Amino acid sequence: MSRRVSWEGVFPAVTTQFHDDLSLDIDATAKVMDGLIRDGVSGLIVCGSVGENTSLERKEKVAIMETAKSVAAGRVPVLCGIAEFTTAFAVETAKEAARVGIDGVMVMPALVYSSKPHETAAHFRAVASATDLPVMLYNNPPIYKNDVTPDILVTLADVETVVCFKDSSGDTRRFIDTRNMVGDRFVLFAGLDDVIVESVAMGAVGWVSGMSNAFPREGETLFRLAKAGRFAEAMPLYEWFMPLLHLDARPDLVQCIKLCEHIMGRGTALTRPPRLALLPQEKAEVEAMMAKALKNRPRLPDVGLKAA
């Protein structure tokens, strides 16, 4: 048995904002969160990859969790990413999330260590068994080097708190394979921006999105169109969005997303080392991409979003 959650729609992987001296700017981070909710997103993921989890101290992660809970005020669910070097550290973070009272956690494989499948499963099991919060398991093999396959998910089907699987492998067949193996045991989320329509067609009911930080209404609209099977309306929006969505698949995705967010007046482009600012040529390429997108920004079909 598992718990059921109502997670669906677009959950931006919220950026963490910094002052010029790279200290945490909690007020600016709160403003980013509130702006996303006001623009109609369905949930928030804080301290994920885009939120620069591994560049944050534990106390900063807790402050961001507390802020997200306060800002959301029950309007949307809030999850916090857990990306730690050891299982024990991950369990500690999960306990802090429970203390804060957010709605769930998104657990990544143990970082740095390239684990065997049974070790990956054991890490997830230990963290999920140590919390009563609902858990989203996060697979991103290009970045974290450990592939959470459907075979691994099968071994975790008995863990009650594991309710959701987010896949960023880019292989949308995984959604079908998972469903064939364990039915509807897990809520399925897409985690890679540039395969979102395909992922929804294959059964994903949610999207942890990077570029929706810059274009939340476009992201939520695209998702809802795909979910409703309105593909004739979705495709022009998807084609317009695709060059920007590809940025989510780059190693420097955080710098690219924060630059786009900055251009939209929603945050700064500052990232903490080891992430450095984009090189001048790279920055110019992203700026040109954004200029073209804004010049041709489409009128959005009605999907039930409140007026901005």
Image (tube, rainbow, N blue to C red):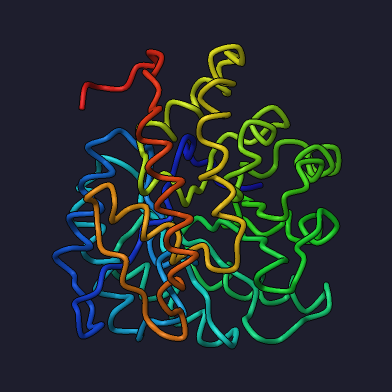
Q: Determine which quarter of the picture holds residue 256.
A: bottom left
Instruction: State the count of labels.
Output: 0
Say which of 282 and 219 sits in front: 282
Q: Determine which quarter of the picture holds residue 160.
A: bottom right
Residue at horizontal 37%, vertical 18%? 299
Against 236, is 295 above or below? Answer: below
Residue at horizontal 42%, vertical 36%? 293
- In the rendered image, residue 213, in percent from the top left (x then y), is placed at 37, 49
Say which of 161 and 244 sits in front: 244
| Quadrant of image for the C terminus | top left
Q: Determine which quarter of the picture holds residue 257.
A: bottom left
- In the rendered image, residue 185, in percent from the top left (x then y), is placed at 70, 42
- In the rendered image, residue 109, in percent from the top left (x then y), is placed at 65, 73
Against 7, is 82 above or below? Answer: below
Q: Which residue occupies the extreme left position in the image?
A: 27
Against 213, is 283 above or below? Answer: below
In this image, 173 relative to 298: left or right? right
In this image, 183 relative to 275: left or right? right
In this image, 4 relative to 158: left or right? left
- In the rendered image, residue 34, in percent from the top left (x then y), is placed at 20, 48
Residue at horizontal 35%, vertical 16%? 304
Residue at horizontal 58%, vertical 23%? 226
In this image, 304 relative to 253: left or right? left
